[in-house]
Image (cartoon, rainbow, N blue to C red):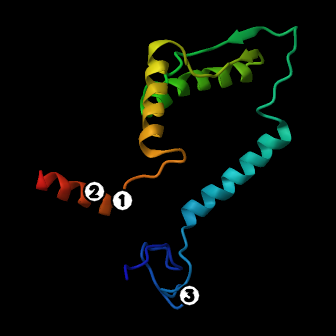
């Protein structure tokens, strides 16, 4: 059994004592502190309706968008990086008191979406819906059959 790493009463990583027996639940003070902070911030957001907007016609309007990801591949970190800049800008402009419009969506037209739809259609034909993926035994049988040929 691997040794438990935590911050025991001595404040040292990996410290174990009678207060922290090996079979006790793991303690992660830094993580727990962050979770409590997150709960407090979320409660504050909820009370203050931080992510709800009422349009005030007397305020300046700010519109932000970004290049929507094409659905011909998987989302990746680059998509997150791109949207985070727009998200930050929208939040900043809202804090400045503007009416902010930040629509979000995916670009699902043209050949890329057609190719993605055909890929899904072919996978459904091959594996069923819901999919039944081949097992290792199926793979071994296919290899044995290919070796006989």
Cα–Cα gap, marks 2 and 3: 51 Å
Which residue occupies 49% across, 79% down?
10
Please tell me whether mark 3 or mark 1 is closer to you in this view: 1
Q: Nearer the viewer, residue 84 or 37?
A: 84
Please tell me whether mark 2 or mark 3 is closer to you in this view: 2
Compared with 102, 9 (above or below) is: below
Image coordinates of residue 26 in percent, x first then y, are: 53, 75
Image coordinates of residue 56 in percent, x first then y, are: 87, 14
The reply to whether the C-beta atoms of the residues labelled 2 and 3 are less than 8 Å apart is: no
| SS state under label 2 | helix
Location of mark 1 (residue)? 135
How crowded pointer 1 is (Cα within 10 Å; few <14, some 14-19, many 20+) is rated as: few
Location of mark 3 (residue)? 19
Q: Nearer the viewer, residue 43 or 132?
A: 132
Can see residue 106? yes
How crowded pointer 2 is (Cα within 10 Å; few <14, some 14-19, many 20+) is rated as: few
The reply to whether the C-beta atoms of the residues labelled 2 and 1 are less than 8 Å apart is: yes
Q: Residue furthest front?
A: 149
Compared with 42, 57 (above or below) is: above
Q: Which mark is residue 4?
A: none
Image coordinates of residue 12 in percent, x first then y, are: 44, 74
The earlier-in-sequence mark between 2 and 3 is 3
Can see residue 74? no
Image side of residue 139 versus residue 17, left or right: left
Image mark count: 3
Compared with 122, 131 (above or below) is: below
Image coordinates of residue 76 in percent, x first then y, are: 43, 33
What quarter of the picture does the N terminus occupy? Answer: bottom left
Location of mark 2 (residue)? 139
Which residue occupies 55% across, 84% down?
24
Which residue occupies 83% across, 35% down?
49
């Amino acid at each position: 059994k691997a040794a438990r790493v935590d911050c025991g009463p001595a404040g040292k990583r990996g410290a174990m004592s009678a207060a922290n027996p090996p079979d006790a639940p793991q303690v992660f003070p830094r993580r727990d502190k962050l979770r409590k902070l997150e709960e407090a911030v979320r409660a504050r957001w909820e009370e203050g309706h931080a992510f709800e907007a009422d349009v005030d016609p007397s305020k300046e309007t700010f519109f932000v968008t970004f290049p929507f990801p094409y659905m011909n591949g998987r989302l990746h970190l680059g998509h997150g990086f791109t949207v985070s800049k727009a998200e930050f800008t929208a939040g900043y402009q809202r804090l400045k008191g503007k009416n902010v419009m930040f629509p979000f969506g995916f670009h699902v037209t043209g050949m890329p979406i057609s190719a993605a739809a055909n890929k899904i259609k072919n996978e459904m034909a091959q594996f069923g819906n819901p999919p039944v993926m081949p097992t290792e035994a199926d793979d071994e049988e296919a290899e044995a059959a290919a070796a006989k040929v």
